Image: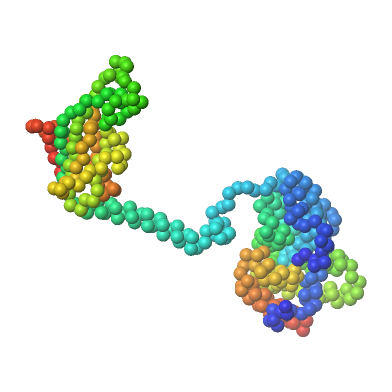
Amino acid sequence: MQPADQSKEQTSDSTIVRRVLSGEVEAFSLLVDRHHARCLRLATHLLGDGDDAEDAVQEAFLRAYRHLGSYRERDRFCAWLLRILVNQCRTLAARQRRWSGADPLVAADVDALVGDTADVAERAAQRDELALALSRLGAEQREAIVLRFADELSYDEMSSITGVGVSALKMRVQRACAQLRALLSEHLHA
Amino acid sequence: MREPAEHSISSWVVSALRTPINGTTAQRVAIMERVRREPAPRRLSAPMRASRWSRRGLLTPFGGMSVFAMLVAVVSLRALEQRDVRGVGALQSSIFIRGDTVVPANDAGHAGVGRRDGTHADSIAERVMDTLRIVEFVLRGPAVRSVAVIGDFNAWRRGATTLALGDDGAWRARVLVPRDALRFAYVVNGAQVVSPPPPRRAPSAHRMTPDSI
């Protein structure tokens, strides 16, 4: 989601899109800078692999650029971009069958990028547990829980992005939460 | 709004999921490099695909059903007309030649006399006369509500020559027909075109053989 304290003078996504469509290609870098981190976090959690996530994000931005002419301003650009990204992640995961292959490097990458020095070991252990638990969830449940909690999306926004009904998404989140709790509890008590 | 208990997970899990992953500048630069190699995007102005009509509310389910119902109604009416004519039963047509008349050959239309602009003929070509036959079409049959005759003489225009119902129950019309305009047909009840066989000259008087259709 857009930060709540986004300054009003910041150029809106729609304005940037209009500039790009009018031939100002470099304006697209504003969109990349603005949404790259969010896309990367989402793709990392969905794919469980930093390199795959980077590829997916790059491809999603490229597809968004190619099809910018079909973007309609009644949609939020970020939601439109996330829809492309989620589809890209699905395609990539199906092709490489890596939904279940959690990469232990993800947690290390996160720590390195965040650069937090406090309780690094404990947090790294927790992220390992989480990455492992997420990797054991089904693709749909993993997608639902990541969109719901990592990206703080409402169910309506999730429905718009995934193309799945709100009721089905609620059910997926509920089951994913239950399964995740069980998996984490199992690991923590193992 | 607070999440239901079954829709929630531990706070540390949420915190871990929300931990920002800031990409590197190199990653963003790589994206822009690939973007620059792409052709410039253009705003699409293609007509909306039919499949999106319903999604946008232009073709609601009710609208779709209405269009389908209208199509069914048109087809049904057509079928009813055909059935109506088939139910007319046997028709009997007679064609009588009541005489000949002479009109200028180059006049606009055979039924009129003289030039339309009111001037007199001033050339030999304009004084050439044509002989037309006065033909009476007669049609009898049960359940007939309207009859028209179409042919070369009225350029096959429906409704140009309608037959009137007489006291004897026969439908009649008198028209001027060129000698070479031998092809014609009836339109019964506004639907079916009934084509009689070519007229044959009657052996006596000016009567042509009645044709049973």
Residue found 31% across the figure and 54% down from its top: B79
Relative to A160, is B37 on the left or the right? right
Give the residue at the far right of this rendering.
A117
- Of residue B143 and residue A26, the one placed in the foreground of this image is B143
Picture coordinates of residue B20 (x, y %)? Answer: 82, 67
Which residue is nearer to you in this view: B198 or B174?
B174
**Percent position of residue A92, x then y:** 69, 59
Given the current orientation, which residue lies at the most extreme left position? Answer: B204
Which residue does the image show at 32% across and 25% down from the upper left? B115
Residue at the spot x=84%, y=75% of the render? A123
Q: Which colour scheme is used?
A: rainbow
Q: Point out residue B127 in the picture as x, y percentages from the top left corner.
A: 28, 19
Q: Residue furthest top?
A: B124
- The quadrant of the picture occupied by the N terminus of chain B is bottom right
Marker count (numbered): 0
Residue sitting at 85 percent across and 56 percent down? Answer: B25
Any part of residue B64 in sight: yes
- Quadrant of the image containing the C terminus of chain B: top left
**Residue A82 image position (x, y, % from top left):** 71, 61
Q: Is residue A85 visible?
A: no
Instruction: Depth check: give the residue in front, B156 or B136.
Output: B136
- Front-lying residue, A105 or A173: A173
Is residue B203 left or right of A149 when viewed as pictured? left
- To which quarter of the image does residue B98 belong? top left
Q: In this view, does B209 lie above or below A112?
A: above
Q: Return the residue found at the far bottom.
A: A189
